[in-house]
Image (cartoon, rainbow, N blue to C red):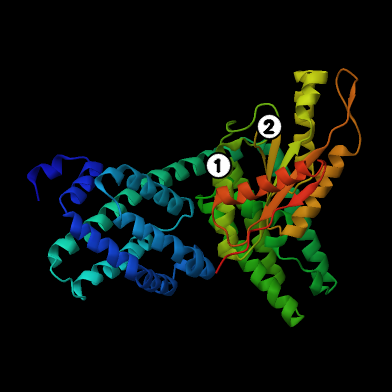
Amino acid sequence: MDKNFIYLTPQEQWRDIILQTPQDEREHVRRQVEVQGQACVAFFCEALLQHADVADFLEKDSIQKSLKRSLYYYLVTLFSATPDHVSRLCKIQMRLGASYARLEIPTHIVAYGFYILKKQILGLFTQDDVGSFDRSGLILYAGGMMDFAFKFIMRSYEKSFRKMVEDNEALRLVSIGQDLSFEKETQARTFFSWCMQTMRALCENSFDDLENLEDSDFGLWFTHKGRNLFNGRSEFMQIQREIESLDTQLHAIRQDGSVPERFVASLHRSIRKIVFLMESIFHNIEQIETGRDPLTKVLNRRFLDVVVQNEISFALSKNKHFSIALFDIDNFKSINDTFGHLAGDEILCFVANTITSSLRVNDYVFRYGGEEFLIVLTETDTEAARKCAERIRLAICGQPVTLRSEQQVSVSVSGGLTSLHGQTNVRTLINRADQALYTAKAQGRNRIVVGHMPQSVA
């Protein structure tokens, strides 16, 4: 190795590796990868499927279908590179690293996958006949290409992951920015309502009426919004454990049709503990207002990717549904031109308030664009999301809006929605909702269109 190599930038080092390898050796490696790369990828996918932690992040079908194709293409592109292609190679690795970070795939899985893949590629030149080529030169070149690809992937991964951590913390602070006294009172009511319903069902031996705390209004709020608001605090984990313990006992009661002797006393202790912990956790957080649209008071786009990626991870790990709906105010430019921009602001606030009041406490509303709003419907499948979107549409177009000027304006919205179907890319999900919204506009506006995932090609 040239001593000056260590003084080069990483991108220049990668270019130097290609420059210092004879073209015929590089061409031989490329041909071998083209011919035997699919077998290497197949072994890699099989190894990945056997890893105990992979199922939490990648589905079997996505590994066997789309990953096989894309990874083979990736390897061919990598080993087809010339010195002039290094800048493009770096950008490809950076995009990959950012994708792994968004999916929250642990670094040990990424490293394990690259180890398997590198071992398979190098095996092409340690086991097979390489003819007149220098075997060590082929191995050094192939290994160097894999090492620098991994280096740039991890560099991007670390940068993107740090950004996600910062955004998660900022989202927590935005959640704190709500009216905490109102939020605290609201969740106290929903928890009290669940307690009264549970006590009534126990007293009347109506065990089929027992609702899991996790599935109650309080439980849904705690699982989704509470997770952003309190995650990382010891009280949050304690409350979560109490909820899981209670729900396990309630499930057993429904199954057995009888109440254990000590259950009521245990239930009373759990209720008191949850109330105490909620008081404590609300007391110990500070109020701050940031990350909200100043006009409509809903979230702005800053935290959209964080929220959606959190819901993707939650849905995949818990086998839950969630959906995204994107609304656009019809003919909004005409409203601004006819009644003025102040009237347009009133319409935006009306639509935002109507959407917010139509949702549950565990759902999210974002101002996505000038006159667009995006909602994240947690634990909601496609049909339930469609019904919710229709309710919102009908509520908005049901009657004219009376402006402060006493003028009346008829308002309608078009909507596109989609649901999680194994797709783990935030942008893909949002784009699918956006395409459905475009279809709703093209079909005449004031309607909801469901965007379906394209059929996979085997």
- On the image, numbered disc 1 is attached to which residue? 172
Q: Considering the numbered disc 2 on the image, is that residue within a helix, a strand or a loop? A: loop
Mark 2 vs 1: CB contact within 8 A: no
Q: Earlier in the sequence, mark 2 or mark 1?
A: 1
Q: Quadrant of residue 240?
A: bottom right
Residue at the outermost left position = 3
Q: Quadrant of residue 41?
A: bottom left
Q: Horizontal and vertical percent for residue 250? A: 70, 71
**Residue placed at 25% from the left, 71% from the top?**
124
Residue at the outermost bottom position = 256
Left or right of 49? Residue 33 is left
Q: Is residue 276 visible?
A: no
Total label count?
2
Is the C terminus in the top left, top right, bottom left or bottom right quadrant?
bottom right
User: In the image, which disc is placed on residue 23?
Assistant: none
Q: Horizontal and vertical percent for residue 256? A: 73, 82
Q: Nearer the viewer, residue 112 or 334?
A: 334
Q: Considering the numbered disc 1 on the image, is that residue within a helix, a strand or a loop? A: helix
**Residue placed at 23% from the left, 63% from the top?**
28
**Residue placed at 58% from the left, 51% from the top?**
428
Q: Residues within 10 Å of mark 2 (few under 14, many from 20)?
A: some
Q: Amino acid at mark 1?
A: Arg
Q: Is residue 158 above or below residue 262?
A: above
Left or right of 395? Residue 41 is left
Q: Amino acid at mark 2?
A: Lys
**Residue placed at 64% from the left, 30% from the top?**
293
Per the model, the C-alpha gap separating discs 2 and 1 is 16 Å
- On the image, numbered disc 2 is attached to which residue? 297
